[in-house]
Amino acid sequence: MNLRRATVADLMDMQNCNLHNLPENYQMKYYLYHGLTWPQVSFVAEDHKGRIVGYILAKMDEEPTEEAHGHVTSISVLRNYRRLGLANKLMQLSQQAMKTTYGAAYVSLHVRKTNRAALALYKDTLGFEVVKIEKSYCAFDAYSMQLNLK
Ligand code: ACO
């Protein structure tokens, strides 16, 4: 398994992975926006044949405030490749890049309240905290979570 920074050439495969794994889907122009604007903070996991089996699509805050912060738009790993530590590694690579490239003070994300696997990853493995409950985020109740990167 190889983990590396995502390129524009990977975006179709990342979208494909997203369509298989999540109800929150995005148009290709949104992937391109991420890839062209903040190329340092999105990563992919590929198998031995170079097929994308997981990704993290991330960005930086669009209206810079006093503290720069990153945001994870979407992360997923194909079913057959789960529980191998890939999401954990993808998150850490992105967090590190947010910190070193942009001086991010923290990283944020939204996760559905019912998504047990992702909640365990964020809370128990990575140390994120819930900062807000968002009613009807993408049609679901969600937690707004943050992790301090300082
Ligand atoms: N049940 C409970 N805890 C879990 C589970 C699970 N099914 N999966 C992961 N975890 C937790 C565990 O604490 C795990 O550590 P452990 O294996 O040592 O016990 C830790 O997370 C790290 O697991 P990874 O192996 O790194 O996670 P994985 O590569 O399997 O990916 C993910 C986790 C991304 C949530 C995967 O299950 C997935 O793709 N799900 C569907 C898509 C999804 O829900 N994405 C997140 C949406 S929110 C957003 O995108 C911001």
Image (spheres, helix red, strand yellow):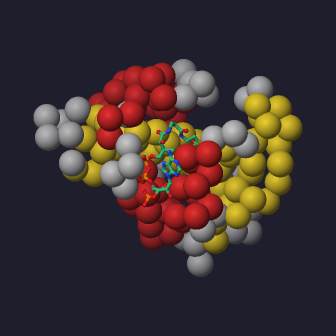
Image coords of residue 41 (percent x, y): 45, 53
Q: Residue furthest left?
A: 49
Tell me which corner region of the image, top left, top right, bottom left or bottom right, holds residue 56.
top left
Compared to residue 29, the image places residue 148 above or below, namely below
Q: Is residue 13 left or right of residue 97?
A: left
Between 26 and 64, the one lying in front of the other is: 26
Q: Residue furthest right?
A: 135
Residue 107 versus residue 118 in the image, above or below = below
Q: Residue furthest bottom?
A: 150
Q: Does the image show residue 107?
A: no
Residue drawn at the location 75% of the way across and 59% of the way down: 130
Residue visible at 62% across and 61% down in the picture: 123
Does 140 sit left or right of 8 as displayed? right
Numbered disc total: 0
State the residue at coordinates (57%, 47%).
118
Residue 103, position as x, y percentages in the image: 54, 70
Where residue 94 sits: x, y (%)? 45, 57
For the C terminus, the quadrant is bottom right
Above or below residue 69? Residue 71 is: above
Residue 10 is at least partly visible in this image? yes
- Expressed as whole percent of the image width and height from the top left, the position of residue 9 reads 29, 31
- Residue at image coords 79%, 59%: 131
